[in-house]
Image (cartoon, helix red, strand yellow):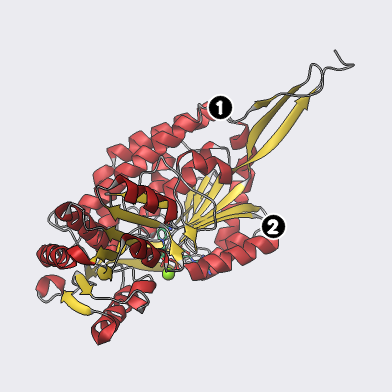
Amino acid sequence: MSTLEAKGNWIGGAWRPSSSGEVREVRNPSNVDEVVGVVAWSTPADVAAAVESAEKAFRSWKNMPAPSRARILSKAADILAGRLEEVARLLSREQGKPIGEARGEVQRGVDLLHYYAGEGWRSLGHVIPSAAPGALMFTVREPLGVVGVITPWNFPVAIPLWKSCPALIFGNTVVLKPAADAPLTALAIASVFEEAGMPPGVFNVVTGPGSQLGDALIQHEAVKAVTFTGSNAVGAHIARQAAARGIKYQLEMGGKNAAIVLADADLDHAADVVISGAMRFAGQKCTATSRAIVERGVLDAFTEKVVERARRIAVRPATDEEAYLGPVVNEAQRQKVLEYIELGKAGEGKLAAGGGIPEGDLYARGFFVEPTVFVDVRPDARIAQEEIFGPVLSLIPADSPEQAIEIANGVKYGLSASLFTNDLTRAMQYIRDIEVGMVRVNAETAGVEFQAPFGGYKASSSYSREQGRAAIEFFTQVKTVTIAPAGGC
Ligand code: NAP
Ligand code: MG
């Protein structure tokens, strides 16, 4: 048994088993015979214990000078940097992210810790001219209290940290409920904070079933805000509960991101970037490229380049240094991806690459799917409308740049989009007309940087933004202060 297996939940500065005593195995999606670890399968009572610890820790954490909180985050950054390889391997084994990308994600976690440590040293308010003689009027930003953090499995280091770090640096305390498919990585983060000397109760992790623990977290009266990344169905459920309780909520959800390729684009560059956006980490990024909308004049040439690249992709177990495409996260996810592939084959498109499960012993015990490309896909086909979250790319022809933007906008989501062109006027039109939160030109739909605001339009987000300085808006509330001279001046 690994040390993590014995640890259970991280609550109030101690490792505690589930109150029911139940545990669950976590298996490697590249090879289901490998048990990566065992975690607590917790109950609402464990969530309550975590929230109570966080509530107890709140006042002294809030009142600690922000630069002192910053030092703890900086220390955590250094510790995580020292444990980069260990955490990356754990992530790769528990969740199937190719090891190269897993290292990149842990490095991103280190950078996030440094970045938000920096926020502890920056100003957090404004001085506003008062109309009253001699008065000083200013704003301060204060923490909300206990924040519930509910995260998906696809970025189990980056997402918990990009939510928890701003929550913590602005003086909130945190209860994290990580995804059931990636709990070990979240516990590794807790152990980094433990080593960094985070005071007990400031950061807590409870592992177990989202459907029960999520409700227990959002319903607890001490929880003042909930930040969520995951599916639209769960997001809507969380929003209803948060609204009923009158607490703050923030949702980051699905995407159906398009790359538009105009006739003047550098097609080799566009093909490289589109394939990377569609296929890396098996398309399981909310910002993955899942549609390429291509001007007819270059459709054949672009299709050839994309298909040729898709066929060359190295599909490997995630910890293999060669892996470009690993498995999808679990059997249910693979079934869902294969069902979409069947829709494509049944007439929604023409299959140009992949289309099934790769053959060979290497793939026999994992949830692998071939990198799959469909061409001639109608914009209203289900594979062109619904989030697949797998290594599946649909090529959609367009008659003009304007039509390409219309097709790109013709989905319920609005997270990220790319345009490939060298025409500045076309790029400006696209920047104006595209309905997404993250607009990219000659760059991948995925791989956006954490120091800038992150979030989507339409069904992709709840209008708030995460990351960068934008995180201040969600994780703080504003107090307006006026100090008038006693007796006038
Ligand atoms: P999910 O099923 O919505 O799960 C997300 C989290 O919510 C998990 O921790 C889950 O716990 C928990 N949960 C499940 N039911 C809940 C409930 N009734 N109340 C409260 N919490 C509950 O999403 P997923 O399958 O893990 O992740 C894939 C989705 O995330 C995709 O739609 C993807 O687009 C989206 N995503 C969006 C972004 C973004 O920033 N926009 C980034 C990454 C992923 P369990 O794991 O225990 O069920
Ligand atoms: Mg789920």
Placement of 455 over or under 482, stated as above or below: below
Would residue 445 be seen by someone viewing this image from the given angle? no
Locate the C terminus and report the quarter of the image it occupies. top right
Decide: few, some or many residues near mark 2? Use Cα within 10 Å; few <14, some 14-19, many ≥20.
Answer: few
Q: Which residue is mark 1?
A: 123
Q: Is residue 199 left or right of residue 225?
A: left
**Residue 136 point in image, percent of width and height:** 74, 21
The local secondary structure at tag 2 comes to loop
Placement of 197 over or under 240, stated as above or below: above
The local secondary structure at tag 1 comes to loop
State which image quarter holds ligand 1. Answer: bottom left
Q: Which residue is mark 2?
A: 246
Residue found at the far top of this picture? 489
Distance of mark 1 from mark 2, alpha carbons? 29 Å
**Residue type marked 1:** Ser
Of residues 167 and 55, the one nearer the viewer is: 167
**Residue 57 point in image, percent of width and height:** 60, 42
Q: How many marks?
A: 2
**Residue type marked 2:** Gly
Write the residue at 72% across / 33% down.
480
Which mark identifies residue 68?
none
Of residues 4 and 357, the one nearer the viewer is: 357
Would residue 411 be seen by someone viewing this image from the given angle? yes
Earlier residue among tags 1 and 2: 1
- The reply to whether dot 1 and dot 2 touch (C-beta < 8 Å) is no
Write the residue at 63% across / 32% down.
63
Quarter of the image for residue 340 reads bottom left
Of residues 7 and 486, the one nearer the viewer is: 486
